[in-house]
Image (cartoon, grey):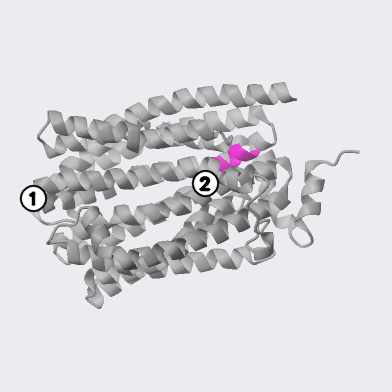
Amino acid sequence: MQQKPETKDMIEKGPGQGAPGNKSIEIFRDAPVPRAVISNIVPSIVSMMMVLVYNLADTFFIGQTRDAYMVAAVSIATPAFLLFMAVGMLFGIGGTSLISRMLGEGNSLRAKHTSAFCFWTGLSIGVIAMIFIWMFASPICRAIGASDDTLGYTAEYLNIVAAGIPFLIVSNSFSNIIRAEGNAKTAMMGMIIGNMANIVLDPIMILGFQWNVAGAAIATVIGNVVAALFYLRHLLSSRTLLSIRPKDYMEKNGIAAGVFAIGVPASLNSILMSTSNIITNNIMSEYGDMTVAGLGVAMKVNMIVVMLLIGLGSGIQPLLGYCFGAGNQKRYTDVLKFSICLALGLSLIMTAICYFGAGPLVHAFLDNPDASGYGIAFARIYIYSGPVMGLLFVFINAIQSTGAAVPSLILSVSRQGLLYIPILFLFRRLFDSAPMLAAAQPAADYLSTTLALVLFLYTYKTVFNKRKTDS
């Protein structure tokens, strides 16, 4: 007699690990759609908002030094930092997609192997990256757009932040992966605790100790260490379906391929975002350091909308992945419809808030008239894409939830790569104007949303038709 998935799941988990996981999985499987969506997206949105607050805190307290060159330096260093966040995203999104599908199929043993693979491989890459930055900090800073006036500050910030890269990768990975087993609140708490440590330490170290840029970097490192240790405590407990034990490490049997199939496209989007920011900073530096400072703050303001909507999109991915793994097309579709309506409403509300509040938000970080003037203009231009950003992130995560590697890859290399970079250079050729260069981002976002819709409709039709054919 064939075992039910739930019975198989209990056998593979071993003693002491069944109950907490099953209670969480019941929300994926049985809760009314609005409750299931809200219970998953709220912790995810809170986590993303904490990331936003932490990013804003660094810039805000550096801004209190009244040194626009320091603000510019942190803005210049951010893309390099995002490259290593992309590694965390690779294992976080790739691991989440595979683990949620495995749990939907009732295969918790393979989920353990996947989480152990993500932990040890990500940690190893983090250590290598840390050493690399320490060896080549100054050339890296030049390459990402530091001028003679900002080089010293940028290198100082990057050298210190490098010490936290292994912890950054672990915390970024497992803030996603832990949601795959239904523990969205635990994932949220790790982000809150880590970011709160950073936020509390920022004013103490930047202004109190007068360590300036170095203080911001040290607070960032400590925040990442605290978050990583919180997740390690959970992963070593009996409350999880996952594992980071070395004996559970496995890269074969489709585990590495399954993680990379979705993780690489997801991380490519972050890598290309970092690359495009570096290119934009280099081009904007032709208009002066105050333009770069204004652009950096405008990006922070735009992040208010983007991070909230990323939280919504990433929050529904484990739920969609579970429904797909379980073969429940109706529930998958219902979750998606509810999420689209929610995303559209939030997008419109946040767009209005950030557009009309651009002035006060920018002035909170910059008091230099030239830099703040650029910042307000750029912030209002960037937010033009706000109304469609929610749809974009919902469709991205819906595609990733099915494990469809090729559509995920196409979409990931398009938004900040195949679409944004050519548009940026086209606008540079057509318009000798910094604000018009900023308009390249909304143009790319609208095209990306259209592409995401087309790719999702293709993916949805293909994967569910294949399921019907196979059954």
Work out whether 96 lies above or below 402: below
Say the numbered circle drawn on residue 370. Answer: 1
Position of 446 compared to 3: left or right? left
User: Which label sits on residue 93?
Assistant: 2
Q: Using residue 100 as the reference point, say whether residue 148 is left or right of it.
A: left
Membership of 319 in magenta stretch: yes
Dot 2 lies on which element? helix
Which quarter of the rendered picture does the C terminus lie within? top right
Region of the chain picked out in magenta, as a range: 316-322
**Quadrant including the N terminus:** top right
Residue in front for this viewpoint, 37 or 159:
159
Classed neighbour count for the residue bearing mark 2: other residues with Cα under 10 Å, few (<14), some (14–19), many (≥20)? many
Whether residue 191 is visible to the viewer of this picture, yes or no, is no
Q: Amino acid at mark 1?
A: Asp
Going from N to C along the chain, the mark reached first, 1 or 2, is: 2
What x and y, as percent, mark residue 410? Answer: 44, 32
Q: Position of residue 232 (x, y in %)?
A: 57, 66
- Residue for point 12% across, 61% down: 148
- Rendered residue at 24%/60% (across/down): 139
